[in-house]
Image (spheres, rainbow, N blue to C red):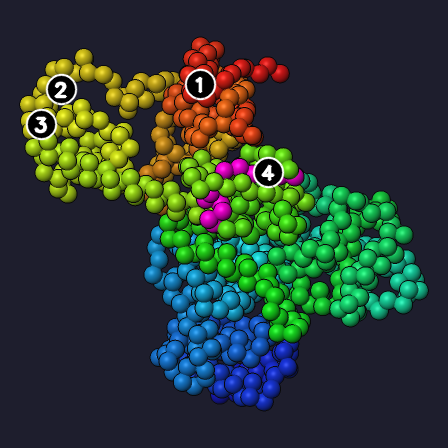
Amino acid sequence: MELTDEFIEKENKAIAQEYKELLRISYQTLSDSDKKMIRKAFDVAVDAHKEQRRKSGEAYIFHPIAVAKIVASQIGLGATSIAAALMHDVVEDTDVTVEDIERMFNPKVAQLVAGLTKIAQVKKDMNISMQAENFRKMLLTLNDDVRVIIIKIADRLHNMQTMDSMAEYKQVKIASETLYIYAPLAHRLGLYNIKNELEDLGLKYTEPNVYKDIVSKIKETKEQQDAYIQEISEVLKSSLDAEGIDYIIKGRPKSVYSIRRKMKAQNVGFDEVYDKFALRIVYKSNPHDEKFLAWKIYSIVTDHYRPSPSRLRDWISSPKSTGYEALHITVMGPKGRWVEIQVRSERMDEIAEKGYAAHYKYKQGGGNEESGLDIWLNLLKEALENSETNAVDFVEDFKMNLYAKEIFVFTPKGEIKSLPKGATSLDFAFSIHSEIGVRTRGTRVNGRLVPLNYELKSGDQVEIITSPNQKPTTHWLEYVTTSRAKNKIRNVLNENTKKTAEEGKELLTRKLRHLKITMSESVVNELVNFFKLKTSLDLFYRVGIGAIENQQLKDYAAQKSNSFINFFKNRIKKSDKPIAEEDLHRQVLTSNYDMLVFGPEHDKLDYKLSTCCNPIPGDEVFGFVTINEGIKVHKKDCPNAITLQSNYAYRIMSAKWIDSTQQEFKAILNITGMDTLGLTNQITKVISNNMHVNIQSISLNGEAGIFNGQIAVIVQNNTILKKLMENIRKIDGVDKVTRVYH
C-alpha cells in the first residue's frame, strides 16, 4: 500500500475522530484529570506504534483505540482501564518499559499494562500444552487485578472482529482458542453480550459453512419473528400500561452459536429449534420495589399466556454467582409456540450487558458485602496456587466449573451456598472449608445419611459429619466434581505419599546395606527399571507400604552381582520361569482382541484409524475428535500425540481395545455389619485385589454403629462372584453378604 501524504493526512483525521468517539462513548463519567490521563495514554500509544501497520494495512493504533472503546462502552470500565487498554501492546512492541509507564502515569495503570504484557509473552515461551498453560498463566494475573483479564477479553474480541485478512490456519487456531478459553471467561465474568459475539465469531471461522447457513436462515425468518414479537407485545402493553409500569419491550434473537448448539444437542434442523428468540421486558424501578415489580409483571404475563412451571427461573431471589439477576418465564405464545420472556429492571439489564463493571456503579455504601466476583476470585486463586495439577487438567476442571449450571443448597443453619450442578455432598464439605472436607466422615442430606458421592439438588439441606481420624483416600477423587475439592484431596494424598516415600527410602537403604549394596543414584535407577516403575518416588513409596518384598530385593542383588551369567541361566531356564505379567498380557491378546471402546463408560463409537501411526489391536491408544472426520484413533506414542493433547485437550477421548467375545455380567451385593473404622476401605481393597472384578458403583451407609451398603460389581462368571463373596465375609465386622436379584 502506497502511503502518500494525502493518505496519511486522511488517516490522521480518522485517528483523531476515533479518539473523540472514545471519550464520547465512555460509560463512566470522566473527570478532567481522567481525560488528561487518557489523552496522555493515547499520545504514548500513537508514538509507540507510529511505524506499525496491521495485516490489513491500516495503522496499528486503530487496534488499541478499538480495544479501549470496547472497554469503555461495552464493558464500562473507567479511565484507568481505558488508559491501560490504549497502551496494552506498548511494552511488548516497543522500547517503553513498565517503569516508564509508572513514572508517566501511576502504579495502577502500570500494573495493568504489566499484566497484559505478561499474558502476551506467555505465548512465546511455551511449546507444550500451549493453550492450557497460556490460560493458566493468564489467570494468575487475576492476583494482580481482574481488569487485566477484562481488557484481554476486549483485545481478543477486536482481533476476532478483524481476522479476515489473516491466513486460514491462523483464523482457525485463534477461533478455536477463543471458543476454548475466552468465551467461557466472558461468560463467567457476566459479559453475556461479548460472550455471544465471541462464540458467533468463533463459529464463523471454525465452521464457516454452518455459520453462513444459519445467518442466512435467520435473515429469511426475521420478518415472521418481528411480527410474532409485535403480536405478543401488543397484548401485554395494554395490561402493563394500565398498571402504570414504566417499561420497554424488546425482542432478542438467540445467538448463532446457541442455535447451532441446540441443533446439535437435540439433533434437529434450524426450523425445529423453537426458541430462536426471547422477549425482554426492561422496567424502571427504585431499588426497594425491584422484586415486587418483577413479580407484578410475571402476574400480568401469565394472565395472558400459560407458563411452563418447570421452566420458571428466579434469579432475582437467588442471583447467579456471575451477578446475573432476572426472572425468566417460558410461556405458551400464539400458534402454540413456547416463548421465553425475560423480566429485568434497568439496573439488572445493565449488569447483564456490562458484567461486573456495572456492579461497582450500583454498589451502595462502599459495598462492604463480598460480591460473587470476590468469592469466585478467591476460589480461582486457590486452584491456581496448587501447582500439582498439570495445565491441561486445570483448564478442563476450570471449564467444567465454568459451564456448569448452578444449584443452591442450604447449610444446617439455613445459609444458602451455590455449587456447580453435579456437585456431591463431599464437594459441599470442601466448599465450606478445606479442613472440614478433609475430615469428612459422613454426610446427611435433608436429615438422611447419604454416601459421600451423593449428587446434590437445589434446595437440599446438607450437614457434614467430621472425625479427627478421617483421611482422604484415592477413591475420594471419584466422589467429587469441583476443582477446589479435587485439588485439596490431591494435595493431601501427595503429602501422604511423600511421607511414606521418605520412610521407604530409609528402609531401602538399610535393606540394601544387608545385601552389601550401597545406595546411590545409579542403584536407584537400576531398581526403578528392575521393578518396571516410572520414578524413584514410586520405588520408595512401594518399599514404604511393603509392596516390595525382601526376596525381590535379593533377586535384584543376585542379578546385579552376576548379571552376565544370570542372562545365560535365564535363557536356559526360561521354560520353568513363571510368566511375567507383560508376557501374560501378550498371550491374552487373541484375535478376539478387536473391539475399541471409548471413554469411562466404554462406549462403542464409530472411528477411523489414523494413518500417521497406524494403531493395531492391543496398542495403547486414544481418540481425537476431529472437526470433519469424526473420531480418529492415534497411538499414545504417536509423533502427533503431544501436539494434539496439549493444544486440543478438550477433544481427546480415552480409548482401549477389548476382547469382543468376553462377556461380563453385573451382580449386586448387599453387605451388612458393624461400622468399624476402615471397614469401607477393607471391602474395596478385597474387591479391587481380585483381578477379574470391577466395581461399577458403590453405596455405603453407616448409622448409629450399623453399617449397610450395596455394591454393583462386573464379573465374568458365578465362580468368581462366589469366591469374592467368601472373601468379603472373612472381613472383621461383616455380618452378611447376599446377592440381590431384581
- Disc 3 secondary structure class: helix
- Neighbour class for label 1 at 10 Å: few (<14), some, many (≥20)? many
Examine the rendered structure and indicate whether residue 375 appears above or below residue 688. below
Residue 570 bears which disc, if any? 2
Q: CA distance from mark 1 to mark 4?
A: 27 Å
Question: Would residue 651 be visible to someone looking at this image?
Answer: no
From the image, tell me which residue sits under label 3.
563
The residue lying at 55 percent from left, 52 percent from top is 402
From the image, tell me which residue sits under label 4.
444
Please state the horizontal and vertical placement of residue 290, each as a whole percent of the image. 78, 64
From the image, tell me which residue sits under label 1.
728
The three-letter code of the residue at mark 1 reads Ile
Instruction: Please tell me which residue lies in front, 2 or 215.
Output: 215
Q: CA distance from mark 2 to mark 4?
A: 59 Å
- Disc 4 secondary structure class: strand
Among the two numbered marks 2 and 4 on one chain, the one whose residue lies closer to the N terminus: 4
